[in-house]
Image (tube, grey):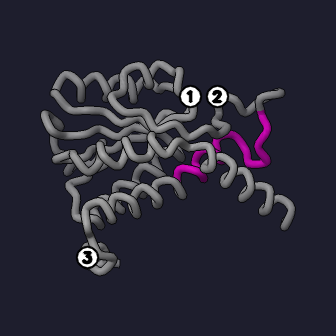
Amino acid sequence: MTTLHARALDEIRACLDQVSGADIDAAVAALAGANRIALYGVGREGLQIKGLAMRLFHLGLKAAVVGDMTTPPVGEGDLLVVSAGPGDFSTVAALMGVARHAGARTLLVTAEPTGAAAARADTVLVVPAQTMARDQGAAATSVLPMGSLYEGALYVLFEILILKLRDRLAITPAAMRANHTNLE
């Protein structure tokens, strides 16, 4: 167990060490400059996106997960954040098209900077991790199965984005806590 745990943590660290500081700054700027933020991801990537949406809400930002009944429309001044680790998904492509047509900007989080979704995005945050696009044969190098390295790296990276955004917006930890639900 210890060897697997150490290797998994080392892989996440190595992945995050390769994320560009300029990409992180651009993502923080896109989030900080948005009026409303809609977020979308599929599968386990979607779970990480939902966690990011929750933290954005804790910061007091207007954030909603695409597909929830309370998600507002997007338009000028808004941002659609999508995750497409393997480079693209049909749903991501469709949503990016709707957002662009409505005048919203897009922020893509991906492991594949040359994927089709990256070509459509206004801002790209590259997380160079194994996804299901490269989880077989010689390309599979992670001890974690399928796309888990990407998803684990997203969790940590999204928390770092929140810390940087919190500092940029001068929001206190107490203010964040005040936005946490009391209905648990």
What's the residue at 52%, 27% (across, down)? 113
Residue 121: quadrant of the picture:
top left
What's the residue at 22%, 64% (across, down)? 60
Helix, strand or loop status at disc 1: loop
In percent of width and height, residue 165 lies at 33, 58
Residue 149 seen from this side: yes
Residue 133: assigned label: 2
Highlighted range, magenta: 140-154
In percent of width and height, residue 22 lies at 45, 41
Residue 147 magenta-highlighted: yes
From the viewer's perspective, is 80 left or right of 164? left
Say which of 2 and 113 sits in front: 113
Tell me the crowding category of disc 2: few under 14, some 14 to 19, or many 20 or more residues within 10 angstroms, Cα based.
some
Say which of 136 and 159 sits in front: 159
Looking at numbered disc 1 in the image, what kind of residue is underneath it?
Glu
Tell me the crowding category of disc 3: few under 14, some 14 to 19, or many 20 or more residues within 10 angstroms, Cα based.
few
From the viewer's perspective, is 127 left or right of 30? right
Tell me the crowding category of disc 1: few under 14, some 14 to 19, or many 20 or more residues within 10 angstroms, Cα based.
many
- Residue that mark 3 sits on: 175
Residue 182 seen from this side: no
